[in-house]
Image (cartoon, rainbow, N blue to C red):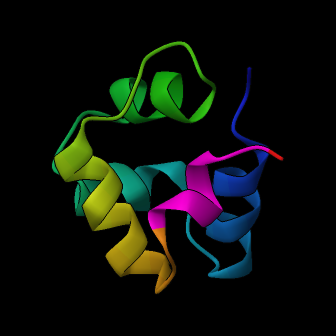
Amino acid sequence: MKNYTLKSLRAKKGLRQRDMAELLNMPITTYSSKENGERKFTIEEAITLSDIFKCDIREIFLVF
């Protein structure tokens, strides 16, 4: 499943996938596949994402 929450949070901050890849220190292709749900984020990456977006990890990754 694609992570629409992550994509919308990224867009609201005006960040591109390239920007996110740089912040997470990974190639853009890796970030793109993770954002699109083809690969999983590590817990360390999830914590970094929650820091970037100033929200709880559950807000990014849990689907209700």
State the image coordinates of residue 34 (x, y, percent, origin top left).
47, 28
Query: Which residue extends farthest bottom?
Result: 54
Q: Is residue 38 left or right of residue 46?
A: right
State the image coordinates of residue 59 (x, y, percent, origin top left).
63, 65
State the image coordinates of residue 15 (x, y, percent, origin top left).
56, 70
Image point 33% across, 48% down: which residue?
21
Q: Nearer the viewer, residue 63 or 7?
A: 63
Image point 50% across, 21% down: which residue?
33
Give the vertical position of 10 relative to 43 (above or below). below
Dividing the picture into quadrants, the one containing residue 10 is bottom right
Give the vertical position of 55 relative to 3 (above or below). below
Q: Nearer the viewer, residue 19 or 48?
A: 48
Query: Where does the N terminus fall, quadrant-wise?
Result: top right
Magenta region includes residue 52: no
Q: Is residue 4 left or right of residue 54?
A: right
Q: Which residues are magenta?
A: 57-63
Magenta region includes residue 60: yes
